[in-house]
Image (spheres, rainbow, N blue to C red):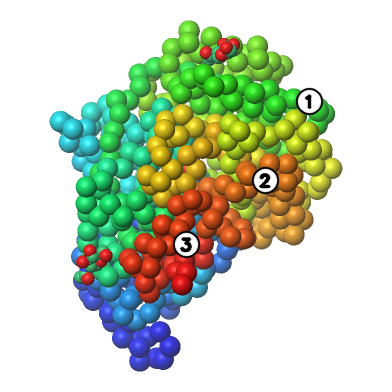
Amino acid sequence: MGNTTSIAAGRDCLVSAVGGVAAHVAFQDSLLYQATAVELYNLNIPVTPAAVTYPQSTDEIAAVVKCASDYDYKVQARSGGHSFGNYGLGGQNGAIVIDMKHFSQFSLDKSTFIATFGPGTTLGNLDTELYHAGNRAMAHGICPTIRTGGHLTMGGLGPAARQWGLALDHVEEVEVVLANSSVVRASDTQNQDVFFAVKGAAASFGIVTEFKVRTEEAPGLAVQYSFPFNLGTPAEKAKLVKDWQAFIAQENLSWKFYSNMVIFDGQIILEGIFFGSKKEYDELDLENKFPTSEPGTVLVLTDWLGMIGHGLEDTILRLVGNSPTWFYAKSLGFTPSTLISDSAIDGLFDYIHKTNPGTLAWFVTLSLEGGAINTVSEDATAYGHRDVLFWVQIFVANPLGPISQTTYDFADGLYNVLAQAVPDSAGHAYLGCPDPKLPDAQRAYWRSNLPRLEELKRDLDPKDIFYNPQGVQIVS
Ligand SMILES: Cc1cc2nc3c(=O)[nH]c(=O)nc-3n(C[C@H](O)[C@H](O)[C@H](O)COP(=O)(O)OP(=O)(O)OC[C@H]3O[C@@H](n4cnc5c(N)ncnc54)[C@H](O)[C@@H]3O)c2cc1C
Ligand SMILES: *[C@@H]1O[C@H](CO)[C@@H](O)[C@H](O)[C@H]1NC(C)=O
Ligand SMILES: *[C@@H]1O[C@H](CO)[C@@H](O)[C@H](O)[C@H]1NC(C)=O
C-alpha cells in the first residue's frame, strides 16, 4: 500500500479486475461508503475496508485476489455478512472485500440429487430452491438471511444436523480461488488438502465460488414444540436446566429429536422439533418431564418449509436478527463426558440472580447437536468438535450503542462460571459464533486440526493474504 502512487495503481488494478465497471467496486471515498458498501453487521466492531468489490465471475475474483497479492492487501469474502466479528469485512481496517452477491446460481441434478449453488445463496432461498426442484433438503442453521458462503465453510449447526450432519458435511465439492489466484476444484478425490481446509476454515485459505452438496429427501412429518417457563427462584431455574441436560444426555436419544433451551432475563424457553410422528413425539413425554404452567405450543407439520420456517427462529431473532446492532457473544462446547455439574448449574443461576447485566437484551442458549455430526472423524474436515453434544452460547446486545463494561463483565462472568466448573468446555469455541476477545482462539476453533491447518497455510497462502484477526496463522 504505502505511497500514493501504489494506492492509485492498486485502485486501477481493482477496477480492471472487475471488468472496468466502476459500479462493481467501492472505495473509501465513494458516496455513502459505510452505509451502502461496508454495511457493518456487528456495530460494536467498527471496520473500514480499503475497498468492497462485486465481481461477477470466478475469473474476476481471481483478478481481485491477484491485485491484493500484488499490492499487499488482505482480502476476505463476504457472503451474507453475518459474521459476529465482521470478519467478512476483514475484521480490521484496510482489507479488500469480495462481496459474493452475484454468486447466487442454483441447480439440482435430478439423477444424483447433488445440488450446485453459489455462496451468495441465502439459506432461505436454498431451502425453497431445493424443495421446489425435487423435494430435497439439507441441514443448516436457523437464520434464513445467512448465506451459504460463510455458513457451509465454518460448520452449520441446526435442527436437522443430528440426522444429516453439519451443513459442511453435505459438501461434496467446491470451486475455490486460492492465494496464488488459481481456480481449483476440491473434493475427496482432488486437492484433498484444500477440501479439508475449506470445510471449517475457508476464510484463511481462499474464496469459495461454488458448492456441490449431497441432499436428502425433505421430511414430510414433524412435531414442533415450544414451552415457556416463568420460574421464580434461581433453584427452580437450575432444576429445569439439570433436567434438560439429563434428558438430552441419554445415550439412546433419537437423532430425530432436536432441542434448544433459551434462558432470557425473565423467562426460559424449551423449544425444538421432532422429525417424526406425533405418536413417537408423545413417547418422549416432554410435557410430563418438563411441566410448565404456561401455555405451550405443539404443532404437527407436514410441510418442510414450514418446519424450518418461523417457530424456532423467532425466539432468538426477537433479540438479534437481520438488522445490525451492537453485540458480543461467546460459546462453549460440552461432551457426554464433560457435562455441567449440578453445582455449576446452581452457580450459573446464582450468578445471573446477583449480577447486573447492564442490558435487558441478553440470552444464553443450550443447543443439542451430536448425532450424525459426531460420526464423522475429527480429522476428516477442519471442523474440530466431533465430540460436542451440546453448545452453550452467551449473547449480549445493546440496541442503543456500544456494549458497556458492565455488560461485557456480565457475559464474561457467565462464561467463567461454566469454564471454571468444566475447563474442557472452554477448549471448544464455535467459529460461527466468533469471539474477537478470546485469547488463543485458533486452538479453541480448530482444536486438534490446528497444526495441519497451520502447515497448509504456509503452503497455500504464504503471504497470509486471506487474513482475519482470528484466522489460521503462519507460524514459523
Ligand atoms: C441471527 C443469526 C443466527 C445464526 N444462527 C446460526 C445457526 O443456527 N447455526 C449456525 O451454525 N450458525 C448460526 N449463525 C452463525 C452464522 O452461521 C455465521 O455467522 C456464518 O458464518 C454467516 O455466514 P455469512 O455468509 O452470512 O457471513 P459472512 O460475514 O459473509 O461470512 C462469515 C465468514 O465466512 C467467510 N466467508 C464468507 N463467504 C465465503 C466464501 N465464499 N469463501 C470463503 N470464505 C467465506 C467470511 O470471510 C467470514 O469470515 C447465526 C448468525 C446470526 C447472525
Ligand atoms: C497455485 O497453488 C496450487 C495449490 O498449491 C497449485 O496446485 C497450483 O499449481 C498453483 N498455481 C500456480 C499458477 O502456481
Ligand atoms: C432410553 O433408555 C432409557 C433407559 O433404558 C429409557 O428409560 C428411555 O425410555 C429410553 N429413551 C428412548 C428415547 O428410547
Determine crowd level at label 2: few under 14, some 14-19, many 20+ residues with C-alpha closer than 10 A. Answer: some
The residue pinned by badge 3 equals 471
The residue pinned by badge 2 equals 423
Up the image or down, 254 lies above or below 470; here it is above
Q: Which mark is residue 14?
A: none
Where does residue 25 sit, x and y in percent of width and height? 33, 71
How many numbered circles are shown?
3
Residue depth check, mark 3 versus mark 2: number of the one nearer the observer: 2
Name which residue type carries label 2. Answer: Pro
Name which residue type carries label 3. Answer: Gly
Residue depth check, mark 3 versus mark 1: number of the one nearer the observer: 3
Say which label, 3 or 1, has the lower sequence index. 1
Are the two marked residues, 3 and 1, in contact with CB atoms closer than 8 angstroms? no
Residue closest to the eye, 186 or 228: 186
Where does residue 44 sit, x and y in percent of width and height? 60, 61
Task: Residue 102: name its quadrant.
Answer: bottom left
Please give the name of the residue rendered at 61% of the width and 21% of the height, measured from the top-left corner: 247
The residue pinned by badge 1 equals 236
Tag 1 secondary structure: helix
In three-dimensional space, the C-alpha distance between marks 3 and 2, rounded to whole angstroms, equals: 23 Å
Up the image or down, 145 lies above or below 92; here it is above
Label 3 CB less than 8 angstroms from ligand 1: yes
Residue closest to the eye, 125 or 357: 357
Tag 3 secondary structure: loop
Residue closest to the eye, 475 or 14: 475
Please give the name of the residue rendered at 44% of the width and 69% of the height, measured from the top-left corner: 474
Please give the name of the residue rendered at 38% of the width and 68% of the height, measured from the top-left corner: 458
Determine crowd level at label 3: few under 14, some 14-19, many 20+ residues with C-alpha closer than 10 A. Answer: many
Name which residue type carries label 1. Answer: Glu
